[in-house]
Image: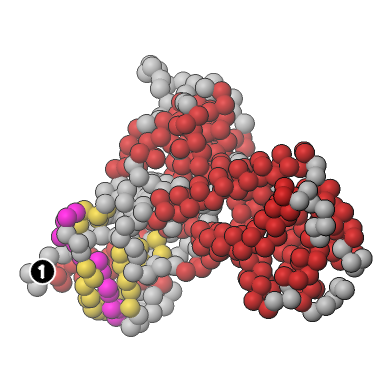
Amino acid sequence: MTWKEYFTSSIGKKFVMALTGISLILFLIVHSTVNGMIFFNDNGETFNFYAHFLSHNWLMRLAELGLFVGLILHIIQGLMLWAQNNAKRPVKYAVNPGNATSAWYSRSMGLLGSLLLIFLVVHLSHFWWGTKVSLYASGHEGHNLYEEMKNAFQIPWVVVVYLLGVIALCWHLIHGFSSAFQTLGINSPKYNPIIKTLGIAYSLIVCLAFAMMPLAFYFGWIS
Amino acid sequence: MEHKEINLNLKVWRQKNAQDSGHFETYKAENISTEMSFLEMFDVLNEKLINEGQDPIAFDHDCREGICGMCSMHINGRAHGPWEGTTTCQLHMRAFTDGQTVTVEPWRAKAFPVLKDLVVDRSAFDRIQQAGGYVSVNTGNAQDGNALPIDKAMADASFDAAMCIGCGACVAACKNSSAMLFTSAKVSQYALLPQGQAERKTRVLNMVAQMDKEGFGACTNTGACEAECPKQISLSNIARLNREYLNAQMSL
Ligand code: SF4
Ligand code: FES
């Protein structure tokens, strides 16, 4: 079987989703840890130091590139799967089982993912774009990401959008985490409880950390 | 068990043939014994329809003891009705209450076109099976049962997978109309046995290719199939299918 046949098969498509999903899961660990540095409450000194370090490290820039490729694959493949799977039932049921046979968030990955995509556009245009422009245009000097965060999170609608984004992310991760393992064929009574618990713990911790950031700035918990 | 008689309002999908667009029709099912099976309830109703000179409701059935997988009905939003691990023929009327409205629909999937009323064409499953769900042997005398040593755990897992009756409830219950649970059961039952090793890799590739060709969706691990499967085939079979597929791809 050729690689093309493999990656266009129903199982291959899921592999793409799982592998890119896991790389995004790993990225979120780094992202939330570095952003968590703002809670040192040292006027962003530690945070800015690491943010500067990451954006000036060629290995990290390479990883960032890989991440973007993965992200775009995840988005395109996900949207395509959503549309293709939907088309497999042209006449819908009059009565549906609701949550009796599956969890609502596991059925709503396309919707949650689309919400995340919208959030991502807002998010990247807020912080990532500005950082890159200043990095390439002005050689970064004088760019203070901490200050930018602080300013952005003074605006109520921005805070609300971020909180909604984080909520969508949390449900997306709770299904995505264990689903990725299942797709990769890792399913055994020995590991299943660990994967399930780890997935929920990971999703809650990461999302709580992210949710705290806009809140902390808005309510002035950190100066 | 207390014997009772109940009356039901039935909303049944009627469709003349594959080309017809179909519609719901309401019927009254009266004096239904709670000890009847769901199919027997339909028999009573059909008897009445025939006596009145109407076209009886077409539905699939054969064994009526939960082993043939024919009795495909989506009852009140659930494949094979509200009971777990049960086919429609094994669903008893005591699962319903007097005066309840019960909506009965055929399996809905592009790969399972409706032929008439509640009857769908499940031959896509046959073609998946024909693509690799067998072991090629040059026939001769049957071997002695103990000639091939098999690990007990493997034999049990294989048997659990072989319980699949090809009913299609997994497809009907899945929001993606995916046939992964069925295909994974058929792949697993051979992958775990020594007899299945010779064709292990080509089997999984061919069966998945056929599954995709038939127009079933891709699995998103919602678990609805496992929840609705009358034989309670486990999702771990789908994980095994994924492993088998990856392994075949890596080495063929
Ligand atoms: S896996 Fe279960 S639901 Fe699917 S065809 Fe087999 S017995 Fe029916
Ligand atoms: S009629 Fe055979 S399983 Fe129901």
Name the chain letter of the residue that bears numbered label 1: B
Residue lying at the far left of the rendered structure? B53
Q: Residue, x 40% and y 56% (percent of image)?
A: A86
Residue lying at the far right of the rendered structure? A42
Query: In the image, is A126 to the left or to the right of B130?
Result: right
Quarter of the picture holding the N terminus of chain B: bottom left
Which picture quadrant has residue A206? bottom right
Q: Residue, x 76% and y 66% (percent of image)?
A: A149
Q: Position of residue A79 (x, y in %)?
A: 48, 53
Residue lying at the far bottom of the rendered structure? B99
Q: Is residue B12 magenta?
A: yes
Which residue is more in the foreground, B219 or B131?
B219
Q: Is residue B42 magenta?
A: no
* A161 over B250 or under it: above or below: below
Q: Mark 1 = which residue?
A: B54
Which residue is more in the foreground, A105 or A8?
A8
The answer to whether one can see residue B231 in this image is no
Q: Which kind of residue does numbered mark 1 sit on?
A: Gln
Q: Residue, x 45% and y 32% (percent of image)?
A: A5
Could you say whether the residue bearing mark 1 is in a helix, strand or loop?
loop
Label 1 CA crowd tier, 10 Å (few <14, some 14–19, many 20+): few
Magenta segment's dominant SS is strand
Magenta-highlighted residues: B6-19
Q: Residue, x 86% and y 73% (percent of image)?
A: A222
Q: How many marks?
A: 1
Q: Position of residue B173 (x, y in %)?
A: 42, 58
Query: In the image, is A161 to the left or to the right of A10?
Result: right
